[in-house]
Amino acid sequence: MNDIQSYLAVASILFSLGVFTVITRRNAIAILMGIELILNAANINFIAFNRFGGMERLDGHIFAIFVIVLAAAEAAVALAIIINLFKNIGTVDVDQAKELRG
């Protein structure tokens, strides 16, 4: 049971859960968690295609590390924005974010 279909099935489930979370949640922290699920699904695909694609190089691993670094930077910036939103409004509801406009 160590074939590419199982990896792709797990990645598609994670991606679907991430998209569902981003679309349905109003809490900014939950939306960030959904984005992280989407990025992790992409990482699983990179690693699976690298492993089963017949390439002996580490292209998929390098892309996965790049995505992890990108996710860490995105989380740091997004959490700073969420903290600012909470400090100004008192909630992390993204529907209330339109009040931050000048």
Image (tube, grey):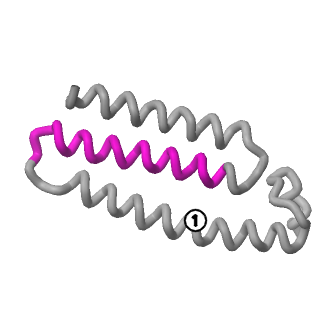
Measuring from the top left, give residue 76's x and y in whole percent.
58, 71
Is 42 placed left or right of 22 in the picture?
A: left
User: Which residue is found at the position 51% from the left and 46% from the top?
Assistant: 37
| Above or below 30: residue 11 | above
Is 101 placed left or right of 76 in the picture?
A: right
Is 15 placed left or right of 61 in the picture?
A: right
Q: Quadrant of residue 68?
A: bottom left
The image quadrant where one finds the N terminus is top left
In the rendered structure, which segment of residues is drawn in magenta? Answer: 31-55
| Above or below 18: residue 99 | below
Measuring from the top left, give residue 101's x and y in whole percent.
87, 66
Q: Is residue 36 magenta?
A: yes
Measuring from the top left, give residue 88's x and y in whole percent.
88, 72
| Above or below 11: residue 95 | below
- Disc 1: which residue: 75
User: Which residue is found at the position 16% from the left and 38% from the top?
Assistant: 53
Asked whether 57 or 29 is in front, the reply is 29
Magenta stretch: dominant secondary structure: helix
The image quadrant where one finds the C terminus is bottom right
Q: Tell me which amino acid carries mark 1.
A: Ala
| Structural crowding at the residue carrying mark 1, measured as other residues with C-alpha within 10 Å and reported as few (<14), some (14–19) or many (≥20) | some
Q: Is residue 24 magenta?
A: no
User: Which residue is found at the position 36% from the left and 49% from the top?
Assistant: 43
